Image (cartoon, coloured by chain):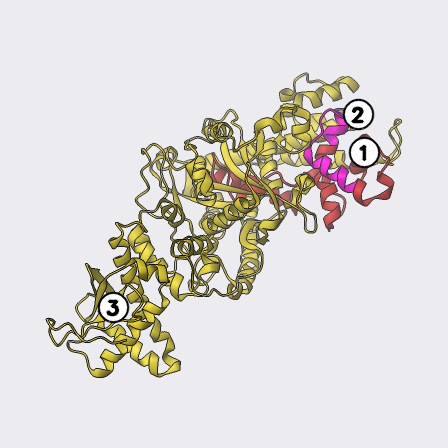
């Protein structure tokens, strides 16, 4: 309904508002507009009011003036000061063209988006910035509370990837305005940023109709297994039985002193109903791990302290993580279930996906390490946890606090044997080395009493003993010889690293290896930024139209990365000193013989338990 | 293939990130060479059993004292899918896993 202009107003200002029942009114300043333009401006205002949720209009009980300007500056679409909104005049032409010609419908949107954006600012300001200061919004947007800062939040937002509009990162106020645009205009918003969509819908008591989302699974680009480098996963939250805090305990190395904190997802095998049995579907379990991505050979503590390394969320198969820690790094793992209900698990996973696709943070050893990142993920994913006093800057400190707050349940470790059997603990293999050697020594007069001595022997000198033991001794030898192979590999690695650091680019044998290494380390996909695999058009969680592209991109990257691995390996091999290589070859030959011998012995009947069932 | 890859992966692991491990290095040690000799292709079923080989060796060597989660997963899998495994003891099944 059009109303007559107030008698005291200039004739140039034509007051006009729709719909009459709403509290918010938009009045178009008519100065300098042709009748067509004025008409189009009113249609635009009406379209914006139509899109705004009733609660928004009702709570913004005021008149807003809309004017078109051509002096806003390059790239600026609009500005809101007090109750006056100025929009870039160029948008008006697009709006008119879009209204007339269905082919130009794409031109339609910028004017509407700009107006909604500015109205969001007006609303936010009118309510004392209640939208942009809302702690839940700040958690979701990516301005988390930092430890050691008395509850202050970060000043930068590191959710750079797959943003609908990088301007949202400028400040929480702009974040609100940009996201309300998309909330109101984009039917895909509910799928791409589901948590924010729910947040706004709850605030305003409803939302525009949403499109249907991509399948039931959340897309993650995970590390592959075996020879595979990358793998695309569709994680169905309904298959996740529990989320556990996975703590890698310290070993002798100083960098490991505070442990490493991760999250383990106990995923049920397809078709298995959720329940305790899912604990044993180990090959489906995943680990979410924030890691400093170090794109150089030597880790610099200075760079680690000052935030020069990216911190990103990696998704890894549990088996790989268990092997890496318990067999390679010789560190134990504790996996402590978190008391979360099914809905909380769902929102936590959704948050993890959001972080996976968008987050590219800075690792700082003190205040943005894996524990801080894990805590930030937990509180953004599960709002209930944001109220618990959990902030801790070390991984084992975080676990203690989770336990004290009753969120983590350490009672699973009470019975040590059950904890190991049920996968609440994974012991470092080193813990068993001496026991294994003692088993073999009970059968054979070995020349070494201590596991350490045995493993340091020349593999050729161990070989004759390996061919003699009974079944138990042979099984023990197998585990020890695996450890020996890893030791030889570690020695080669260390020697190459030292040589690389000393001679670097002058060492011809290492130039090619160095190049391949840097190619691998600089690789986006490997570096935990899956967003680089997709074209820049989409934002948030990948949707149906992107999943095909994604599957293809992951397959291509996987092949390329495998090639890079292979060439790096070939170059590295060439650079290894022959004596070291000989030791490794001998240990591997021992292991192969042991494998065969054990297979034959286990089949055969050397004692009562002989016959396979 | 697996053997050579694992060397590279280990090489990368330290190179890439000494304190936190690295994405590239995470396959380090995953291929227990002792178990790789049998067959090239592994079905989903075999995977559970193959993955339990190290645990089975520790179980047999320790006479049942060390009972890891991968072994438990394989035992449950065998008992659920193999009719002959129902009456067998853990030790017998662990030996059967080593015999594969």
The residue at which mark 1 appears reads as B95
* Mark 1 vs mark 2, CA separation in Å: 16 Å
* Mark 3 vs mark 2, CA separation in Å: 90 Å
Residue range of the region highlighted in magenta in the rendering? B57-78
**Chain identity for the colour yellow used in the image:** A
Q: What element carries label 2?
A: loop
Going from N to C along the chain, the mark reached first, 3 or 2, is 3
The chain that hosts pointer 1 is B
* Mark 3 vs mark 1, CA separation in Å: 80 Å
The residue at which mark 3 appears reads as A26
Task: Return the residue nearer the eye: A480 or A182.
Answer: A182
Q: Can residue A454 be seen in this view?
A: no
A250 horizontally vs B2: left or right? left
The residue at which mark 2 appears reads as A469
Q: Are marks 3 and 1 on the same chain?
A: no
> What residue is drawn where x is 46% and y is 65%?
A209
The quarter of the image holding the N terminus of chain A is: bottom left
Q: Label 1: few (<14), some or many (≥20) within 10 Å?
A: many
Q: Position of residue A134 (x, y in %)?
A: 34, 47
Of circles 3 and 1, the one toward us is 3
Of circles 1 and 2, the one toward us is 1
- Write down the quadrant of residue A118 in the picture: bottom left
Q: Is mark 3 on a helix, strand or loop?
A: strand
Task: Return the residue nearer the eye: A55 or A457.
Answer: A55
């Amino acid at each position: 309904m059009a109303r007559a202009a107030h008698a005291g107003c200039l004739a140039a200002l034509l007051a006009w508002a729709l719909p009459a029942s709403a509290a918010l009114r938009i009045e178009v300043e008519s100065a300098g507009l042709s009748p067509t333009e004025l008409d189009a401006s009113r249609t635009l205002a009406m379209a914006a009011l139509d899109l705004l949720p009733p609660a928004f209009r009702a709570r913004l009980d005021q008149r807003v003036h809309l004017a078109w300007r051509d002096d806003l500056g390059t790239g600026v679409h609009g500005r809101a000061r007090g109750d006056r909104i100025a929009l870039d005049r160029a948008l008006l032409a697009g709006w008119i063209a879009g209204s007339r010609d269905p082919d130009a419908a794409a031109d339609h949107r910028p004017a509407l988006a700009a107006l909604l954006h500015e109205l969001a600012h007006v609303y936010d300001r009118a309510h004392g910035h209640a939208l942009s200061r809302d702690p839940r919004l700040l958690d979701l947007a990516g301005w988390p509370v930092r430890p050691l800062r008395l509850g202050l939040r970060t000043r930068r937002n590191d959710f750079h990837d797959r943003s609908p509009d990088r301007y949202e990162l400028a400040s929480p106020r702009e974040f609100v305005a940009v996201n309300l645009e998309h909330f109101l205009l984009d039917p895909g918003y509910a799928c791409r940023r589901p948590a924010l969509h729910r947040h706004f819908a709850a605030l305003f008591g409803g939302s525009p109709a949403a499109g249907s989302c991509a399948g039931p699974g959340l897309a993650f680009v995970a590390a592959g297994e075996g020879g595979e480098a990358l793998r695309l996963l569709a994680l169905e939250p309904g298959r996740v039985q529990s989320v556990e805090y996975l703590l890698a305990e310290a070993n002798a190395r100083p960098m490991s002193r505070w442990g490493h904190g991760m999250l383990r997802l106990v995923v049920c095998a397809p078709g298995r109903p959720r329940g305790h049995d899912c604990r044993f579907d180990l090959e489906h379990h995943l680990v979410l791990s924030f890691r400093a991505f170090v794109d150089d050979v030597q880790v610099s503590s200075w760079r680690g302290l000052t935030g020069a390394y990216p911190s990103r969320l990696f998704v890894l198969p549990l088996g790989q993580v268990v092997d890496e820690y318990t067999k390679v790094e010789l560190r134990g793992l504790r996996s402590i279930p978190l008391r979360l209900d099914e809905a909380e698990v769902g929102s936590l996973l959704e948050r993890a996906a959001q972080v996976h696709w968008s987050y590219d943070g800075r690792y700082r050893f003190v205040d943005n390490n894996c524990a801080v990142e894990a805590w930030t993920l937990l509180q953004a994913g599960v709002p209930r946890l944001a109220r618990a006093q959990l902030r801790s800057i070390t991984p084992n400190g975080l676990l203690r606090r989770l336990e004290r707050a009753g969120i983590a349940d350490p009672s699973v470790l009470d019975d040590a044997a059950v904890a190991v059997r049920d996968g609440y603990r994974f012991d470092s293999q080193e813990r068993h080395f001496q026991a294994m050697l003692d088993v073999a020594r009970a059968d054979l007069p070995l020349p070494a009493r201590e596991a350490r001595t045995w493993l340091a022997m020349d593999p050729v000198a161990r070989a004759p003993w390996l061919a003699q033991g009974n079944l138990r001794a042979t099984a023990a030898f197998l585990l020890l010889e695996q450890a020996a192979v890893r030791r030889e590999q570690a020695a080669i690695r260390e020697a190459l690293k030292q040589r690389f650091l000393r001679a670097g680019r002058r060492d011809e044998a290492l130039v090619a290896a160095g190049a391949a290494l840097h190619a691998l380390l600089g690789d986006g996909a490997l570096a935990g930024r899956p967003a680089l695999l997709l074209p820049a058009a989409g934002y948030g969680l990948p949707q149906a139209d992107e999943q095909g592209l994604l599957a293809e991109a992951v397959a291509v990257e996987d092949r390329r990365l495998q090639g890079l691995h292979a060439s790096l390996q070939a170059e590295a091999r060439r650079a290894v000193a022959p004596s070291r290589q000989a030791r490794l070859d001998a240990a591997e030959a021992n292991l192969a013989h042991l494998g065969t011998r054990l297979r034959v012995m286990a089949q055969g009947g050397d004692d009562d338990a002989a016959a396979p069932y | 293939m697996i053997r050579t890859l694992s060397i590279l992966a280990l090489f990368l692991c330290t190179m890439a990130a000494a304190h936190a491990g690295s994405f590239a290095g995470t396959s380090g040690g995953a291929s227990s060479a002792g178990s790789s000799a049998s067959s090239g292709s592994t079905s989903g079923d075999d995977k559970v059993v193959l993955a339990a080989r190290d645990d089975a060796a520790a179980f047999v060597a320790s006479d049942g004292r060390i009972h890891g989660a991968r072994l438990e997963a394989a035992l449950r899998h065998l008992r659920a899918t193999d009719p002959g495994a129902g009456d067998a003891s853990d030790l017998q099944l662990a030996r059967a896993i080593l015999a594969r």
